[in-house]
Amino acid sequence: MCKMNFFKELKDFNIPFHKNWDAGKHSNFKIGGKITAMIEIYKISQMMDAMRILNTYKKRYFVIGNLTNVLISDGYLDVIFIRLKGDFEKILWNRKNLIFVGAGVSNEKLLKFMVKNNLGGLEFLAGIPGTIGGAVYMNAGAYGKLIGDYIIDILILDRKGRFKVVQNKNIFSYRNSIFQKDRSVILGAEIKVFSKDKKKVLKEIKEIISIRRAKHPWKAACAGSFFKNTDKFPAGMLIEDAGLKGFSVGGAMVSKMHGNFIINKGDATFKDVIKLANIIKNKVYKKYKIKLKEEVVIIK
Ligand SMILES: Cc1cc2nc3c(=O)[nH]c(=O)nc-3n(C[C@H](O)[C@H](O)[C@H](O)COP(=O)(O)OP(=O)(O)OC[C@H]3O[C@@H](n4cnc5c(N)ncnc54)[C@H](O)[C@@H]3O)c2cc1C
């Protein structure tokens, strides 16, 4: 079926889209080319229509958050990105220690809500620049805490367009969730929170941010930690011990501040990053017989 019909159907169902969307420019890595289109979804009915249309036209698609954990290939990609906005950017607080957070809510917005309402428990999300959808998909975390440990259930739309509330049982492991396999659309999650004085919550958030500023290349174009930590050692430690801090391929460089951050010095290409990542993996393997695995989601 031709492209025209796909976009006409989106239009007929009032689903906004941006053709030839510059995905690389919008990604935190600032690497990658243009994609067929980025669709914006504001309410559940639009998501259901969009999924039906995407399936009808057999489109390859990804729901995205803030693109802070992805590396996108250069050139043109025939792929559709979906961004959840509107109703998915809402936080509902119906029960004392439970909040329902839409997948499009940024961690920053969630933490502001928590401070305002004297709620704590999720301070560890401070400085993780993504959305709740991205956090659930990746089981994001820091300082020994993981979002998966705070989630009660997740509202999803599966790939066949069926709504499901999935209880948090066998869903999460380190930087992993079952959604990485089944590729469901995460619409929101019910999250456990605790009453906590706003001054304390804010103090902890500020402390975490200042630790991050001191340890991470805070403002660099990157996708956070490139590799997953291994059972025994943090990936950054292995990379630093292999003498790779500051090592570059083209415009991609192992951060001088933190071994597990590959940064874009300005003109890095997808190939530069992949080449650098392979060198890192080979060197670490040669030295420690440990295989590093990417945490970053590669879209090519
Ligand atoms: C400076 C910096 C620091 C970071 N620090 C940390 C850290 O301490 N801990 C940590 O865990 N991560 C960290 N990250 C990585 C990243 O911010 C997290 O993984 C974050 O949770 C990704 O969220 P996102 O909204 O940007 O997702 P994206 O990057 O947009 O997407 C990531 C993946 O999730 C999928 N996805 C996103 N939303 C949905 C949805 N609604 N439904 C289905 N799939 C979805 C996408 O398809 C993609 O495969 C850091 C990144 C940066 C740049």
Image (cartoon, rainbow, N blue to C red):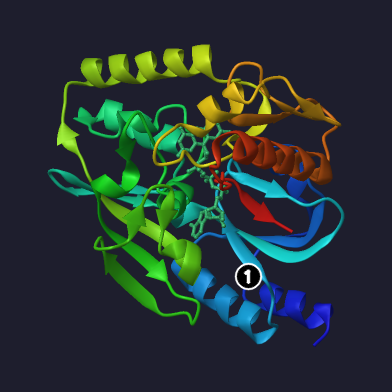
**Residue 101, image x and y in percent?**
34, 49
The residue lying toward the viewer, choosing from 118 and 183, is 183
Give above or below for 216 relative to 286.
above
Q: Residue at x 68, y 72 (%)?
A: 60
Location of the C terminus by quadrant is bottom right
Q: Splitting the image into 4 quarters, where does residue 55 fall?
A: bottom right
Give above or below for 279 relative to 16.
above
Q: Residue at x 37, y 75 (%)?
A: 163
The residue lying toward the viewer, choosing from 166 and 90, is 166
Circle 1: residue type:
Asn
How dense is the environment of label 1, judged by Cα within 10 Å: few (below 14), some, or many (20 and up)? few
**Residue 268, image x and y in percent?**
82, 35
Location of the N terminus by quadrant is bottom right
Q: Residue at x 54, y 29 (%)?
A: 238
Q: Is residue 20 visible?
A: no
Give above or below for 272 relative to 237.
below
Q: Residue at x 29, y 68 (%)?
A: 166
**Residue 102, image x and y in percent?**
39, 52
Count the labels in the image. Answer: 1
**Residue 108, image x and y in percent?**
44, 32
In the displayed structure, does residue 154 sit left or right of residue 248?
A: left
Q: Is label 1 in a helix, a strand or a loop? A: loop
Give above or below for 34 relative to 14.
above
In the displayed structure, does residue 224 sit left or right of residue 143?
A: right
* Mark 1 Cβ inside 8 Å of ligand 1: no
Q: Splitting the image into 4 quarters, where does residue 110 fall?
A: top left
Q: Which residue is mark 1?
A: 14
Q: Splitting the image into 4 quarters, where does residue 2 fall?
A: bottom right
In the displayed structure, does residue 250 sit left or right of residue 88?
A: right
The residue lying toward the viewer, choosing from 297 and 36, is 297
Q: Is residue 60 visible?
A: yes
